[in-house]
Image (cartoon, rainbow, N blue to C red):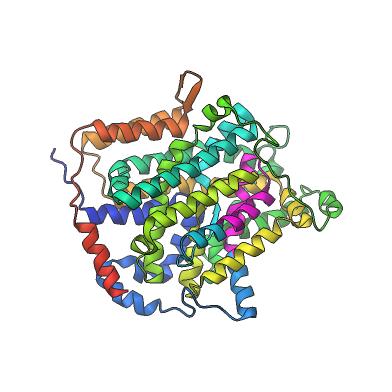
């Protein structure tokens, strides 16, 4: 059967619709974006979308003080649930996740010359690698891995500055990235169900499961039925409802909250002071580097969508290399103090679309507030008091949507599974990633999603019949958008 490869702009649309759904926060944006259908309809209606998205506050406009505070708090609520969920799942301090997200966002804004209105929070793509690294070498190994992932971003940014970015799209086509995203979601499915269903002793408990199901139902209601800003905070809303249910069910202990101080420094993890940096840790940390390569596609998808929302071409100005470098620097900063890797958040892109307030100063305000929150002991203790089944209930939907978004990428990109090449690549990635395959060479252990991603990239490079990308198509598309902007 002859394979008809999709045109390059179709592949680009697949990246826009698929890669930026790598995490659940991006899905909440997709649900909200139904109100903003214009900027997702395509290039022919871009002018109408531009008029519809005329900003109330443009990128470099400074809001009035009261307006500044309220708008920044909106962004804080949008990212809060997802940002604290990742450290909760991997056993890191949520307070450090808040602080590192604030510091990372400010670093991102500086590197992008205060032109890209984006907020950076905890990345869901690194959950499994962090757990694996911590199991093998402790928290220090996970932090070294995060640091190295940030370095990968920096190296890629330098290459993009010199050689452009088409090579990334050739290296990571949808037939590779889509199945890897599916592996991310399905690989964590057992963790989510176990958290929602089992008590502290690991035994089934209907009481615990009921809390998880109430949380799951509330998260679905926020995502589907609520409008405006409430539709942008499904994770936070679900956690709040689940927490209230858990209070009445007797699953919450307020003693630590009452005993906590108002100001309290979190448990930072500092290299050389709190953990050793040696060769064995470096080998374990390499588990996370392949994931960094895959999440680059997520970043590019964010920048494409954000360009449409704001009406500016961020791929060219300040340039994709700057935004990737900013993402990498945020991850490095987070690793140096004990936080999870960072990524730009789709919920906050959704807030931009709804409010039409694109001011970078609003995002900077949210970053400052998040940093301050990390030092408030009462807030940290309150987060720690959230019952495990509540987080499990959110995670059931979260990990399922991650897997479904990988499938959506394959559908939107029109990947032809009648082509044996595509069938082989996706099949190998899925079975190796979900089946728990691992390779150990000289003390270096590759397993799960990291190994699956490497296999997918290698197969895509060596198997014959790769789709040909017309070199000028993307530039023509970008040029049209730039002229409109």
Front one among 480 and 108: 108
Seen in the image, is 47 located left or right of residue 152? Answer: left
In the depicted structure, whether residue 454 falls above or below residue 352: above
Residue found at x 74% / y 53%: 380
Residue at image coords 31%, 32%: 458
| Most foreground residue, 291 or 102 | 102
Q: Quick check: 239 left or right of 26?
A: right
Q: Quadrant of residue 416?
A: top left
Quarter of the C terminus within the rendering: bottom left
- Residue nearest the viewer, comparing 228 with 62: 62
32 vs 333: above or below: below
Q: Is residue 281 above or below residue 214?
A: above
Residue stretch rendered in magenta on the structure: 76-104
Among the 4 quarters of the image, the one containing residue 437:
top left
Is 85 part of what is drawn in magenta? yes
Residue appearing at x 48%, y 74% in the figure: 60
Residue 224 seen in the figure: no
The quarter of the picture where the N terminus appears is: top left
**Residue 268 x/y as whole percent:** 70, 45
Observer able to see residue 203: yes
- The chief SS type of the magenta part is helix
The quadrant in which residue 468 appears is top left
Q: Position of residue 425 (x, y in %)?
A: 30, 34
- Measured as percent of width and height from the top left, residue 182 is found at 42, 41
Q: Position of residue 82 (x, y in %)?
A: 58, 53
Task: Residue 41: say if magenta.
Answer: no
Left of 22 or right of it: where is 207?
right
Image point (64%, 64%), residue name: 368
């Amino acid at each position: 059967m002859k394979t008809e490869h999709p045109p390059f702009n179709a592949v680009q649309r697949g990246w826009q619709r698929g890669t930026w759904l790598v995490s659940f926060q991006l899905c909440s944006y997709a649900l909200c974006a139904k109100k903003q259908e214009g900027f997702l309809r395509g290039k022919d209606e871009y002018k109408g979308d531009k008029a519809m998205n005329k900003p109330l506050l443009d990128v470099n406009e400074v809001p009035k003080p009261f307006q500044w505070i309220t708008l920044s708090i909106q962004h804080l609520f949008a990212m809060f649930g997802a940002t604290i969920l990742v450290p909760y799942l991997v056993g890191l301090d949520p307070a450090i996740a808040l602080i590192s997200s604030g510091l990372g966002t400010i670093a991102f804004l500086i590197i992008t010359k205060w032109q890209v209105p984006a907020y950076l929070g905890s990345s869901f793509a690194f959950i499994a690698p962090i757990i694996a690294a911590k199991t093998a070498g402790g928290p220090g190994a996970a932090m070294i891995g995060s640091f190295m992932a940030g370095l990968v971003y920096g190296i890629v940014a330098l290459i993009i500055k010199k050689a452009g970015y088409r090579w990334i799209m050739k290296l990571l086509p949808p037939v590779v990235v889509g199945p890897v995203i599916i592996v991310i979601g399905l690989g964590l499915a057992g963790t989510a169900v176990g958290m929602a269903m089992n008590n502290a002793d690991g035994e089934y408990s209907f009481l615990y499961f009921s809390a998880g199901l109430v949380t799951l139902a509330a998260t679905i209601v926020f995502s589907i039925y609520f409008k405006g800003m409430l539709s942008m905070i499904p994770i936070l809303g679900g956690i709040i409802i689940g927490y209230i249910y858990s209070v009445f069910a007797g699953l919450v202990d307020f003693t630590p909250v009452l005993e906590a101080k108002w100001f309290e420094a979190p448990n930072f993890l500092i290299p050389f002071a709190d953990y050793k940096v040696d060769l064995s840790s470096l080998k374990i940390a390499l588990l996370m580097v392949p994931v960094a390569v895959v999440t680059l596609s997520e970043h590019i998808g964010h920048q494409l969508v954000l360009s449409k929302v704001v009406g500016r071409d961020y791929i060219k100005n300040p340039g994709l290399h700057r935004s990737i470098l900013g993402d990498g620097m945020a991850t490095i900063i987070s690793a140096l103090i004990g936080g999870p890797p960072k990524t730009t958040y789709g919920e906050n892109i959704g807030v931009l679309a709804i409010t039409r307030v694109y001011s970078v100063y609003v995002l900077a305000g949210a970053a400052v507030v998040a940093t301050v929150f990390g030092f408030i002991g009462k807030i940290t203790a309150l987060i720690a008091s959230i019952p495990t089944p509540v987080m499990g209930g959110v995670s059931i939907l979260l990990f399922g949507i991650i897997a479904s978004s990988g499938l959506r990428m394959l559908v939107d990109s029109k990947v032809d599974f009648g082509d044996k090449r595509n069938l082989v690549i996706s099949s190998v990635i899925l079975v190796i990633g979900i089946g728990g395959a691992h390779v150990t060479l000289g003390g270096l252990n590759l397993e799960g999603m990291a190994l699956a991603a490497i296999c997918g990239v290698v197969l895509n490079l060596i198997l014959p019949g790769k789709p040909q990308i017309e070199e000028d198509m993307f530039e023509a598309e970008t040029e049209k958008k730039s002229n409109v902007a």
